[in-house]
C-alpha cells in the first residue's frame, strides 16, 4: 500500500482520468504535542500527491479534508474510488495539476490510514479506542507542518479546504503565516455556532449511548455501534442539504403507492434516502473518529487565543485569501464568512470573496457549479509559481 | 495608509492624452488623476475591475472592488484584483469609518435605490469620495423628453424598461444632495465623451465627476 517515505517521484505524475494514484505513508517518531496537553508518539500520516513539484519547489498546494474525507482527493485509487474533490483537482481542472503539485493528507484520529483510534496504543499494546487523545484543528495543522518539512517544501503556494478543511487552511495562515502564500477557505467559518455544536452533540450522543459502543472499546468486542453511527450521519446529512434541495429531490414522495401505511417503516423517499446514507456510513466510518472530528469542529475558534478578537488573530497573517460561501448553506452560512472577510479587510489583507448563489446547501462546495469552479480556476491561474522564492 | 497631498485638478486632471486613452469611460482618467499614488481604495460597483486595474497600474493602489454579478466578480479575479461579492444595497457595514483613502462610485450611484444612504456611507468609509454620475440635464436628454420620449445616449445607454439606472439626476441635483448629506464638493469635472465642458456644463455635459470630502 505504501510507497515508502518522502517519495516525490515523477511517476506520481499527472492524475489522468483512469490513472491510479497510490497512497503514501510518512512516519514520525518525535512526539506531537497536542492542545489538550497530551501528546501523540510514534504516529504516521497517509497522503497522496498529484502533479510534479517544480524546481523552485514553490508550486505545492495542500488540500485539507472535511469531516468524512481523507487523503484521497483526486484521481482513482487502487480500489477504483474517485477522490472526494476530483471535480476540483486534476489536469486542466480549477486546481490544475499540470501547474501545481497537490498534496492530499489524512489527519491523525481519522479512520482512513493515519494514526487513529483503531491503531495500537504503544502504552497498552491494544487499540486506542476511546483513549485516543482529543485533537484540534491546530494539532492537525502542526502534524501537517511536519509532513511539509519532510517533503522539503518551504512554502505552500496555497493551502485549501472546504468546511472543516477551510478551518485548517485558516489555522495555517494564523499559526504559520510565512508557510503559505494563499489561503483558500470555502464554505467554512471562524467558529461554530451554538446550533452547530448542538447538532454535533446530538450526533455524538447517538454514538455514545449505542449499547455496542462499549465506552469506545468496541473493537475488542467485535462489534460496531452501527445504530449510533447511522443516526449521527442522518442528522449530519440533513444539515448539509438545503430545504429546497431536499424538497426538489424527494418532496413528500412515497416509496410505494399513494396511501399512507400508518406504521413506522420506511415510507417517504427522504426516509429511505437518509437510512441508506446512514447504513452506508456505518459500513465504512469509525465511531471514535466521528466523535474526535466533531469535537475538533466544536473546539475550533480562530479568535480564542486572541481573547476572542478575530481582528487581532489575523493581524500577523501574511497570506492572500480566497473565501467562498454558498447562499443556501445554513450550516456555515454566508454571514459567518462575512465575519472573516470583515476582519481581513480591517487588517488590509488581500482578500477576494465569492458568494455563490447555489441551491444545494453546505454540500455545494463538493459539487460542480460553473460559477464556483470558474472563480477558483481564475484565482489559481493568478497564483504565481516558478521561482518566486 | 498615509495619504500623499491630493493633486489639484488644474495641474494633473486634464491631461488630453489621458482623456483620449480612456475613450470608453472618460471618467476613469479624471478619477485616476484624483487618486494619490499608493492609496488604499474601495471601488463600489466595480464591474469587471477595469478601473481598479487602471488604478493599480497608474497609481499603485491597494484595496478592494465590491461587485454583485458573478461574471464581473470572475473577471476581477482573472485580473488578479481583490473583489468582494456583495450587494451594495445592503450597506457598507464591512468597512470602518475613514478606512480608505479614496472610496469610488463610478456610474453606480444612479443604479442604487438607497441613494442618500449610499452617499453618506461612501463619505463615511472614504477620507475622500469620488462619484461619477450620468447627467440627465444634458441637452439631447432634455430634447428627447421634450419630444415625449425617454432619452437613450452613451451615458444613458438603456431603454426605460431595461435600465439598471433607478435614479435620474442632473449636475445641480447631485451637488444639492452632496451638500444635504454633509459632504462638500472639492473638485468637479463635467465631460461630454472625452471632452471637458466648462461652459454651461449642466446643459452641454453628459457625465459629471465629483470629488467629495466630509464637512
Image (spheres, coloured by chain):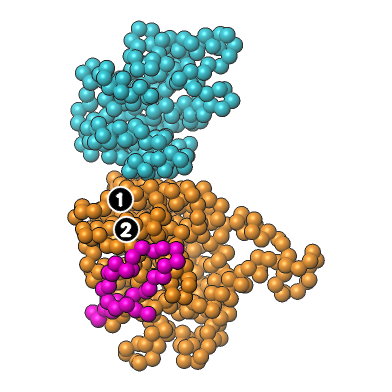
Chain colours: A orange, B cyan
Residue B149: x %, y % from top left:
58, 14
Judge whether residue A301 can be spotted in this image.
Answer: no
Quadrant showing the C terminus of chain A: bottom left
Query: In this picture, is A8 found above or below A59?
Result: below
Q: Residue at x 40, y 54 (%)?
A: A92
Looking at the rendering, the stretch of residues picked out in magenta corresponds to A1-30
Please identify the quarter of the rendering in which residue A304 is found: bottom left
Q: CA distance from mark 1 to mark 2?
A: 10 Å
In the picture, the disc for residue A383 is 1
Q: Residue at x 66, y 70 (%)?
A: A272
Query: In this picture, is A18 found above or below B67?
Result: below
Residue A322: x %, y % from top left:
36, 51
Residue sitting nearer the eye, B124 or A353? A353
Q: Is B187 displayed left or right of A192 in the figure? A: left
In the picture, the disc for residue A100 is 2
Q: Is B93 displayed left or right of A8 in the figure? A: right
Residue A350: x %, y % from top left:
30, 47
Amino acid at each position: 500500500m505504501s510507497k515508502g517515505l518522502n517519495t516525490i517521484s515523477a511517476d506520481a505524475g499527472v492524475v489522468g482520468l483512469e490513472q491510479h494514484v497510490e497512497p503514501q505513508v510518512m512516519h514520525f517518531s518525535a512526539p506531537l504535542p497536542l492542545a489538550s496537553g497530551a501528546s501523540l508518539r510514534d504516529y504516521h500520516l497517509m497522503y497522496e500527491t498529484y502533479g510534479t513539484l517544480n524546481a523552485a519547489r514553490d508550486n505545492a498546494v495542500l488540500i485539507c479534508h472535511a469531516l468524512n474525507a481523507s487523503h484521497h482527493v483526486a484521481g482513482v485509487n487502487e480500489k477504483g474510488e474517485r477522490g472526494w474533490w476530483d471535480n476540483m483537482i486534476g489536469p486542466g481542472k480549477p486546481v490544475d495539476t499540470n501547474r501545481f503539485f497537490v498534496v492530499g493528507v489524512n489527519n491523525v484520529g481519522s479512520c482512513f490510514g493515519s494514526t487513529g483510534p483503531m491503531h495500537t496504543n504503544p502504552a497498552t499494546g491494544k487499540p486506542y479506542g476511546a483513549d485516543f487523545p482529543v485533537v484540534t484543528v491546530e494539532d492537525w495543522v502542526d502534524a501537517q507542518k511536519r509532513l511539509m518539512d519532510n517533503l522539503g517544501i518551504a512554502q505552500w503556494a496555497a493551502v485549501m479546504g472546504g468546511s472543516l478543511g477551510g478551518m485548517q487552511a485558516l489555522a495555517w495562515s494564523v499559526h504559520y503565516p510565512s508557510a503559505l502564500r494563499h489561503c483558500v477557505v470555502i464554505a467554512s467559518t471562524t467558529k461554530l455556532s451554538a446550533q452547530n455544536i448542538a447538532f454535533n452533540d446530538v450526533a455524538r450522543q447517538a454514538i455514545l449511548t449505542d449499547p455496542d459502543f462499549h465506552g469506545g472499546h468496541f473493537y475488542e468486542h467485535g462489534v460496531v455501534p452501527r445504530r449510533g453511527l447511522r443516526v449521527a450521519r442522518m442528522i449530519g446529512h440533513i444539515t448539509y442539504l438545503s430545504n429546497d434541495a431536499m424538497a426538489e429531490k424527494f418532496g413528500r414522495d412515497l416509496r410505494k403507492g399513494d396511501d399512507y401505511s400508518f406504521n413506522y417503516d420506511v415510507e417517504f423517499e427522504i426516509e429511505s434516502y437518509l437510512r441508506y446514507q446512514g447504513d452506508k456510513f456505518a459500513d465504512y466510518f469509525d465511531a471514535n473518529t466521528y466523535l474526535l472530528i466533531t469535537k475538533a469542529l466544536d473546539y475550533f475558534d480562530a479568535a480564542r487565543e486572541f481573547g476572542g478578537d478575530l481582528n487581532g488573530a489575523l493581524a500577523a497573517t501574511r497570506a492572500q485569501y480566497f473565501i467562498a460561501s454558498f447562499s443556501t448553506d445554513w450550516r456555515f452560512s454566508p454571514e459567518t464568512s462575512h465575519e472573516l472577510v470583515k476582519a481581513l479587510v480591517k487588517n488590509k489583507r488581500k482578500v477576494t470573496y465569492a458568494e455563490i448563489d447555489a441551491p444545494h446547501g453546505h454540500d455545494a462546495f463538493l459539487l460542480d457549479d460553473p460559477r464556483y469552479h470558474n472563480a477558483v480556476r481564475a484565482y489559481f491561474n493568478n497564483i504565481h509559481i516558478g521561482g518566486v522564492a | 495608509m498615509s495619504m500623499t497631498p491630493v493633486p489639484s485638478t488644474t495641474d494633473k486632471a486634464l491631461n488630453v492624452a489621458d482623456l483620449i486613452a480612456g475613450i470608453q469611460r472618460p471618467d476613469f482618467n479624471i478619477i485616476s488623476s484624483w487618486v494619490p499614488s499608493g492609496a488604499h481604495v474601495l471601488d463600489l460597483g466595480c464591474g469587471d475591475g477595469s478601473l481598479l486595474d487602471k488604478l493599480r497600474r497608474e497609481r499603485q493602489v491597494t484595496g478592494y472592488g465590491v461587485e454583485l454579478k458573478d461574471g464581473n466578480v470572475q473577471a476581477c479575479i482573472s485580473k488578479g484584483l481583490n473583489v468582494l461579492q456583495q450587494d451594495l444595497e445592503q450597506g457598507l457595514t464591512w468597512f470602518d469609518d475613514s478606512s480608505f483613502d479614496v472610496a469610488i462610485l463610478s456610474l453606480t450611484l444612479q443604479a442604487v435605490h438607497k441613494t442618500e444612504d449610499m452617499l453618506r456611507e461612501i463619505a463615511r468609509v472614504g477620507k475622500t469620495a469620488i462619484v461619477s454620475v450620468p447627467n440627465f440635464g444634458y441637452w439631447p436628454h432634455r430634447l428627447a423628453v421634450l419630444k415625449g420620449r425617454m432619452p437613450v445616449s452613451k451615458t444613458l445607454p438603456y431603454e426605460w424598461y431595461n435600465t439598471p439606472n433607478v435614479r435620474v439626476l442632473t449636475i445641480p441635483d447631485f451637488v444639492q444632495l452632496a451638500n444635504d448629506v454633509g459632504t462638500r464638493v472639492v473638485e468637479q469635472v463635467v465631460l461630454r465623451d472625452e471632452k471637458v465642458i466648462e461652459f454651461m456644463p449642466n446643459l452641454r455635459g453628459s457625465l459629471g465627476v465629483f470629488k467629495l470630502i466630509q464637512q
